[in-house]
Image (cartoon, helix red, strand yellow):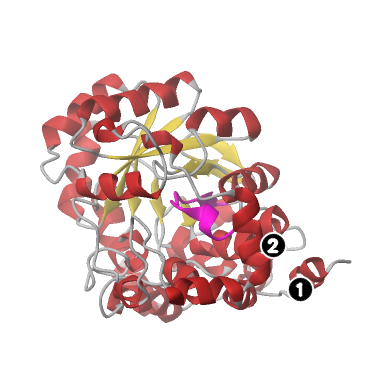
C-alpha cells in the first residue's frame, strides 16, 4: 500500500483524519478549514454540547443486525448523514468536491454542493451519481441568484438549500492572523508554507488555483478565480426578507430546505410558509461567535415543528453516536462538513470514504450498545433525564 493508504487504514476516528490533514496541509490552509469566528466560543461549544448529552441504554433487545437505513427529506438513505455544503474545498485537495460527492453516493447519502464550490453545478451532476442538493447563498445580484436556482433545476438537483445565516461574513481571526485573505495575496510566509509542504504544493501546481465556476460573471467579473470570492463576500444580501423567501418557495418546484435556523419562532414561521425542511445550524461556528450550539438549539425547534417537516442538524458532528443523539432529540439526520473534508484532505476520495466508514460503523456500534435495533427506532426515552428535559 502507498503511504496515504497506510495512513488512512490506520485512522480509527475523525480526529485521526484531522491529524493527518493537519500534518499534510500548510498551517494557513488547515486553519481556514478548522477555525471559527472570533474567540471560537461557538465552535468549541458545538462539540461540547454533543458531549454533554448522555444515553441511558436498554438491554435484552435483539441488536444483532442494527439497521442504519432511514428516510431523509422524503427519500431513502443508507444512514442518517448528509454532506453539508462547503466552499473552497480544492484548497485542501484537488477536485475535492467531486471526491466528496462520489464518496457520498457510494455510501448512499445526500451530497450538498455549495454556491462557492470549485466544481460547477452541471459538471458535478454529470460526474457524481446519487442524491444531489444545491446550497444557495442569497446575493444582491438577484439575476445571478435566479440563474443558479434555474441551473440547479435543469441539472435535476432534488433539493435546494437556502443559507440564511450569512448576511455578512464572520470575523475569522485565524485567517486574519495567517494573512489568508480573499483575494489571496501571496507573502513570503505562504511561499515558505508551500516549500515545507511539497506534496500539497505539487498538487496545487498541477491542479491550478481554484475557480468558483458557479459565480462566474458576478458583478461583471469574467474570471472565476479567487478575486471573485471576494466579490461574493461583498455581494451578500443582508436585506433578504420573508417575502423574498416566499417568492423563491413559489418558483422552486423541488424540495426546499432553509439552513441556519436556531430560533423556534423562525422555525414555526418557516413551517407555516411551506418549506420542506429546516436545517438547524450556526454555520459550524464560523459566523456569530456566541450563537447557541446547534444541538442545544434543536429541542426548542423540534417542539414547535412537531414533526411537520424534517430537521437536519450540523455543527460539531465528529462521532457516529452524534447521529444517534440528534435523532433521539428530534433530527432526521446530521450533516457533516469538516469531518468529510478532513478525510478529503488526508487522502482524496479514499479519505472521504474512510471518514464515512468510521462514522457509520460507530453509529452501528452505538445502536448495539444502546439497545436500539434501528435508527428509525430511536426515541427521546433513550436520553438521560437531563437531556430529555431539554427536549
From the viewer's perspective, tell me whether residue 365 is left or right of residue 118.
right
Q: Is residue 105 magenta?
A: no
Q: Residue at x 42, y 23 (%)?
A: 151
> Which residue, given by chain and number where applicable, does mark 1 sit on?
7
Compared to residue 130, the image places residue 282 above or below, namely below
Compared to residue 157, the image places residue 167 above or below, namely below
Residue 157, how many percent across, how many down?
Answer: 48, 28
From the viewer's perspective, tell me whether residue 103 is left or right of residue 300.
right
State the image quarter where residue 182 is shown. bottom left
Residue 57, how many percent across, how many down?
Answer: 57, 75
Q: Residue at x 34, y 48 (%)?
A: 227
Q: Quick one: label 2, few (<14), some, or many (20+) residues within 10 Å?
A: many
Which residue appears farthest toward the right when viewing the image? 1
Looking at the rendered structure, the number of numbered marks drawn on it comes to 2
From the viewer's perspective, tell me whether residue 180 is left or right of residue 170.
right
Q: Residue at x 31, y 35 (%)?
A: 221
Query: Is the C terminus in the top left, top right, bottom left or bottom right quadrant?
Result: bottom left
Residue 58 in view here:
no
Residue range in magenta is 80-93
Residue 320 vs residue 233, the one in the foreground? 233
Secondary structure of the residue carrying tag 1 is helix
Q: Quick one: label 1, few (<14), some, or many (20+) residues within 10 Å?
A: some
> Which residue, given by chain and number where applicable, does mark 2 sit on?
347
Residue 385, how many percent across, how many down?
Answer: 38, 78
**Answer yes or no: do the residues labelled 2 and 1 have beta carbons within 8 Å?**
yes
Compared to residue 111, the image places residue 142 above or below, namely above
Residue 266 vs residue 247, the one in the foreground? 247
From the viewer's perspective, tell me whether residue 92 is left or right of residue 287.
right
Q: Is residue 83 magenta?
A: yes
Query: Is the N terminus in the top left, top right, bottom left or bottom right quadrant?
Result: bottom right
Residue 157 in view here:
yes
Amino acid at each position: 500500500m502507498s503511504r496515504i493508504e497506510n495512513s488512512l487504514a490506520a485512522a480509527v476516528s475523525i480526529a485521526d483524519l484531522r491529524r493527518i490533514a493537519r500534518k499534510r496541509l500548510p498551517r494557513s490552509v488547515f486553519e481556514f478549514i478548522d477555525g471559527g469566528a472570533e474567540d471560537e466560543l461557538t465552535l468549541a461549544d458545538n462539540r461540547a454540547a454533543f458531549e454533554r448529552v448522555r444515553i441511558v441504554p436498554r438491554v435484552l433487545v435483539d441488536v444483532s443486525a442494527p439497521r442504519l437505513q432511514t428516510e431523509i427529506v422524503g427519500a431513502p438513505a443508507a444512514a442518517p448523514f448528509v454532506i453539508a455544503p462547503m466552499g473552497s474545498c480544492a484548497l485542501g485537495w484537488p477536485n475535492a468536491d467531486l471526491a466528496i460527492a462520489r464518496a457520498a453516493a457510494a455510501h448512499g447519502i445526500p451530497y450538498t454542493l455549495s454556491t462557492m464550490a470549485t466544481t460547477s453545478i452541471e459538471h458535478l451532476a454529470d460526474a457524481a451519481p446519487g442524491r444531489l442538493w444545491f446550497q444557495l447563498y442569497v446575493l444582491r445580484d438577484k439575476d445571478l441568484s435566479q440563474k443558479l436556482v434555474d441551473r440547479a433545476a435543469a441539472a435535476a438537483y432534488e433539493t435546494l438549500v437556502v443559507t440564511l445565516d450569512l448576511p455578512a461574513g464572520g470575523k475569522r481571526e485565524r485567517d486574519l492572523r495567517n494573512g489568508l485573505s480573499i483575494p489571496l495575496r501571496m507573502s513570503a510566509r505562504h511561499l515558505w508554507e508551500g516549500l515545507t509542504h511539497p506534496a500539497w504544493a505539487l498538487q496545487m501546481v498541477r491542479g491550478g488555483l481554484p475557480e468558483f465556476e458557479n459565480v462566474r460573471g458576478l458583478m461583471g467579473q469574467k474570471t472565476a478565480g479567487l478575486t471573485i470570492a471576494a466579490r461574493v463576500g461583498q455581494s451578500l444580501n443582508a436585506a433578504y426578507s420573508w417575502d423574498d423567501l416566499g417568492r423563491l418557495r413559489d418558483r422552486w418546484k423541488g424540495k426546499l430546505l432553509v439552513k441556519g435556523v436556531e430560533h423556534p419562532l423562525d422555525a414555526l414561521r418557516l413551517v407555516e410558509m411551506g418549506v420542506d425542511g429546516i436545517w438547524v445550524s450556526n454555520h459550524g461556528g464560523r459566523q456569530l461567535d456566541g450563537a447557541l450550539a446547534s444541538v442545544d438549539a434543536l429541542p426548542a425547534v423540534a417542539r414547535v415543528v412537531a414533526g411537520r417537516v424534517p430537521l437536519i442538524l450540523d455543527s460539531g458532528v465528529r462521532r457516529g453516536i452524534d447521529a444517534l443523539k440528534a435523532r433521539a432529540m428530534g433530527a432526521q439526520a446530521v450533516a457533516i462538513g469538516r469531518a468529510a473534508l478532513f478525510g478529503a484532505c488526508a487522502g482524496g476520495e479514499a479519505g472521504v470514504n474512510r471518514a464515512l466508514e468510521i462514522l457509520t460503523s460507530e453509529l452501528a456500534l452505538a445502536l448495539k450498545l444502546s439497545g436500539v435495533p434501528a435508527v428509525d427506532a430511536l426515541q427521546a426515552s433513550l436520553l438521560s433525564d437531563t437531556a430529555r428535559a431539554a427536549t
